[in-house]
């Protein structure tokens, strides 16, 4: 009984320190639909419950290794966990608490059970790591690629069963109905949950050996395939909006996909473990040994320190950066006049102080007017509908457009390196030439690390928010002459609005490419 007192007290202090992961935080708990469809970290109570289950299943192994210890591994892992914990509390970056706890679990396993304990704690720590989630820049890119992949797979399925479909970008047109593969239809949430399910299935059939890892490897493609089937079914239904409209309830569909995936993964584990008659390697029976008292005291001291550090006040919030850039880009200049274009919220997300305008100039007697679209959007993590154009999606003029080719090109008048893309619409012969760039952007991986470490909620925050800029000009067909004219329109617009475009936040000199 006395031996359990110290671990119990350490566990209680750990609950106090990691209270936000248990749901005792400022934010509201995510709804089932958000967990099933929207990107983000898995809920803290879910990963804590699964990780705790995995650790409990390994309790005999930890006891048998209690006489071993690897302090050279335990100390740096514990220090990493404490550092991540302190930074998470200072920045309010609660997802980092999951990474901190994963490092603490690994360090405690190495201290109490040596290298063998570290090996046994690897999978539970991996589950805890799934509570971190993808940082927003990386999540935006993954979401867009999964949207494109899901739309392509669903179109292929519809064609395979003989249903005529017109596919362009992330739009599926079946008969008189049009279906938009939005962020929630990307399948990312389902893939994450099924991967978690696969880790549990692997644990249940762990005695079958390494081959059960095939269950975990199969979870992501299975989740994508089931999601594509779901999208194809909804798109081909007589009333898609009733199943997937803005006000539609996606939850039953997500639960059905999750249940089908769970049954499939469990069946795979059962097949690998029993039908194939896997014979695990014989191992000596575990011999329980008593952990040394000083290790329990060290664990208690660590938990007490974390509980005390949880009282650290966060960094003061910075005043919101002013967004007066729309006023600096005039509605008209010279031969150009403009009107505001209705932004497609399901595609662009919230522009967060930005704008979407269509500029027009008369080409001369007997010729149709020429148009250039300008989109400017700002990243703002506080918006309910997140702006997701700070990814390769920026090169697409709209949801029904497919990007055919893209290349980097320097716009010398603006001294920026942009992406020039050629896109085509899915239902007609229209093509578009696009210039897209992100002032102040340091690249996908650098921005992902900044988001993961919540640097913009620290003294290392940037002066201006991330900005997405897109210029596009549509051509009625893909003839080379027509595309050249479209590019000339863009170049003329840049020349006329150069000073206004230069007023957007610029990248620091160190981030500019030569």
Image (cartoon, rainbow, N blue to C red):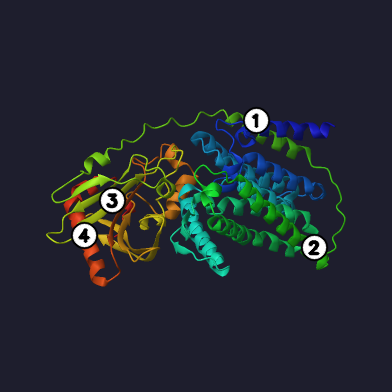
Q: Nearer the viewer, residue 85 or 486?
A: 486
Cβ–Cβ under 8 Å for marks 1 and 2? no
Tell me residue 287's x, y (percent). 87, 50
Measure the C-alpha gap from mark 1 to mark 2: 40 Å
Measure the C-alpha gap from mark 2 to mark 4: 64 Å
Q: Earlier in the sequence, mark 1 or mark 2?
A: 1
Q: Which one is closest to the eye, mark 1 or mark 2? A: 2
Q: Earlier in the sequence, mark 2 or mark 3?
A: 2
Cβ–Cβ under 8 Å for marks 2 and 3? no
Query: In the rendered image, which quarter is residue 395 located in?
Result: bottom left
Would you call the spot at circle 1 few (<14 residues within 10 Å), some (14-19), or many (20 or more)?
A: some
Q: Label 2 belongs to which residue?
A: 273
Measure the C-alpha gap from mark 2 to mark 3: 58 Å
Q: Label 1 belongs to which residue?
A: 16
| Residue displayed at 31% across by 53% down | 470
Label 1 element class = helix
Measure the C-alpha gap from mark 3 to mark 4: 12 Å
Would you call the spot at circle 2 few (<14 residues within 10 Å), some (14-19), or many (20 or more)?
A: many
Q: Which one is closest to the eye, mark 1 or mark 4? A: 4
């Amino acid at each position: 009984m006395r031996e359990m007192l110290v671990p119990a007290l350490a566990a209680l202090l750990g609950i106090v320190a990691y209270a936000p992961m248990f749901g005792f935080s400022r934010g509201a708990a995510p709804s089932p639909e958000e967990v099933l469809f929207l990107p983000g970290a898995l809920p803290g109570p879910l990963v804590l419950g699964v990780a705790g289950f995995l650790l409990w299943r390994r309790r005999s192994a930890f006891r048998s290794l209690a006489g071993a210890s690897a302090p050279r591994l335990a100390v740096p892992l514990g220090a990493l966990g404490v550092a991540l914990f302190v930074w998470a509390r200072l920045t309010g970056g609660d997802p980092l608490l999951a990474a901190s706890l994963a490092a603490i679990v690994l360090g405690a396993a190495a201290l109490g059970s040596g290298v063998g304990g570290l090996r046994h704690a690897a999978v539970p720590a991996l589950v805890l790591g799934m509570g971190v989630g993808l940082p927003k820049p990386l999540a935006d890119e993954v979401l867009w690629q999964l949207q494109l992949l899901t739309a392509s797979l669903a179109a292929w399925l519809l064609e395979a069963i003989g249903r005529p479909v017109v596919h362009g970008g992330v739009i599926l047109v079946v008969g008189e109905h049009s279906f938009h593969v939005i962020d929630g239809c990307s399948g990312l949430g389902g893939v994450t949950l099924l991967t978690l399910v696969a880790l549990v299935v692997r644990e249940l059939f762990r005695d079958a050996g390494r081959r059960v890892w095939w269950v975990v490897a199969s979870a992501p493609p299975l989740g994508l395939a089931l999601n594509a089937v779901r999208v194809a079914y909804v798109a081909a239904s007589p009333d898609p909006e009733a199943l997937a409209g803005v006000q539609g309830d996606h939850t039953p569909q997500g639960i059905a996909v999750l249940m089908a995936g769970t049954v499939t993964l469990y069946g795979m584990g059962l097949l690998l473990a029993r039908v194939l008659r896997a014979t695990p390697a014989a191992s000596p029976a575990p011999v329980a040994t008593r952990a040394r008292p000083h290790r329990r005291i060290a664990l208690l001291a660590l938990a007490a320190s974390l509980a005390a550090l949880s009282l650290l006040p966060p960094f003061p919030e910075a005043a919101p950066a002013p967004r007066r850039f729309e006023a600096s880009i005039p509605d008209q200049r010279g031969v150009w006049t403009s009107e505001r274009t209705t932004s497609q919220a399901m595609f662009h997300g919230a522009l967060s102080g930005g704008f979407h305008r269509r500029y027009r100039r008369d080409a001369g007697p007997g010729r149709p007017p020429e148009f250039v679209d300008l989109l400017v959007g700002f990243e703002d993590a506080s918006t309910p509908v997140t702006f997701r154009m700070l990814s390769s999606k920026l090169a697409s003029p709209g949801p029904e457009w497919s990007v055919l080719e893209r290349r980097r090109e320097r716009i010398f008048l603006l001294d920026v390196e942009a992406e020039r893309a050629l896109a085509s619409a899915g239902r007609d012969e229209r093509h578009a030439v696009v210039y897209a760039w992100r002032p102040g952007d340091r690249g996908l991986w650098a921005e992902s690390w900044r988001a993961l470490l919540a640097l913009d909620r620290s003294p290392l925050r940037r002066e201006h928010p991330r900005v997405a800029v897109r210029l596009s000009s549509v051509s009625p067909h893909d003839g080379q002459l027509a595309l050249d004219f479209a590019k000339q329109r863009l170049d003329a617009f840049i020349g006329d609005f150069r000073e206004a475009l230069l007023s957007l936040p610029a990248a620091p000199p160190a981030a500019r490419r030569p």
